Amino acid sequence: MSDKLINGTFVKTQKVCSYRYIIAKVVPHCSATIIIILFDELKYEVYRFNKELVGDEYDAWGIDDSYLDIIVEQEVKKFVTIDEPAQEPAQEPAQEPTQEPTQEPAQEPTQEPAQEPAQEPTQEPTQEPTQE
């Protein structure tokens, strides 16, 4: 049996669950090299590639590092087909038993006869008998 030469591509599909990037090299006022690393669900490295920031991309970076997050995400999306975002299974909130509101019969106001304030008994001053 002999080997036959062909010119072809073999594609392997791997699940990518996260990525990380490292600013590897910065040439002030000129360029930056970012290393982007893709990981599977077990945090094993699946693939690694570089992104060069030059010209307008480098100038737009300025002092806003969140710009790098956007650039890296765009680069990852060029390599990875993004599935629907992973979501936690929805948990239905526990329902407490509901009670139907009950209406108590309306009570008509009743008038009680007005009471006069009670008077406290008063003591008459007593005079002690005087001796002459």
Image (cartoon, rainbow, N blue to C red):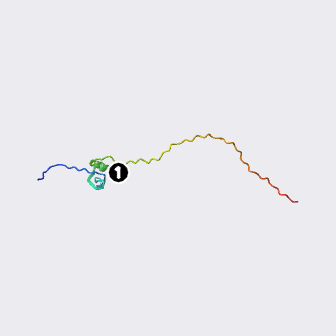
| SS assignment at label 1 | helix
The residue furthest bottom is: 131
Q: Residue at x 34, y 51 (%)?
A: 66
Residue 22 spot, x, y in % from top left? 30, 55
Residue 107, percent across and down?
60, 40
Q: Residue furthest right?
A: 132
Q: Is residue 128 left or right of residue 70?
A: right
Q: Which quadrant does the C terminus fall into?
A: bottom right
Above or below, comparing residue 113 to residue 49 in the picture: above
Nearer the observer, 56 or 74:
74
Viewer-closest of 30 and 40:
40
- What residue is pinned by disc 1? 66
- The image quadrant that residue 39 belongs to is bottom left
Given the image, on which type of amino acid does mark 1 rest? Ser
Say how many tags the image has: 1
Residue 34 image offset from top left, x and y in percent = 28, 53
List x then y, in percent, for residue 57: 29, 49
Give neighbour class at mark 1: few <14, some 14-19, many 20+ (Cα, 10 Å).
few
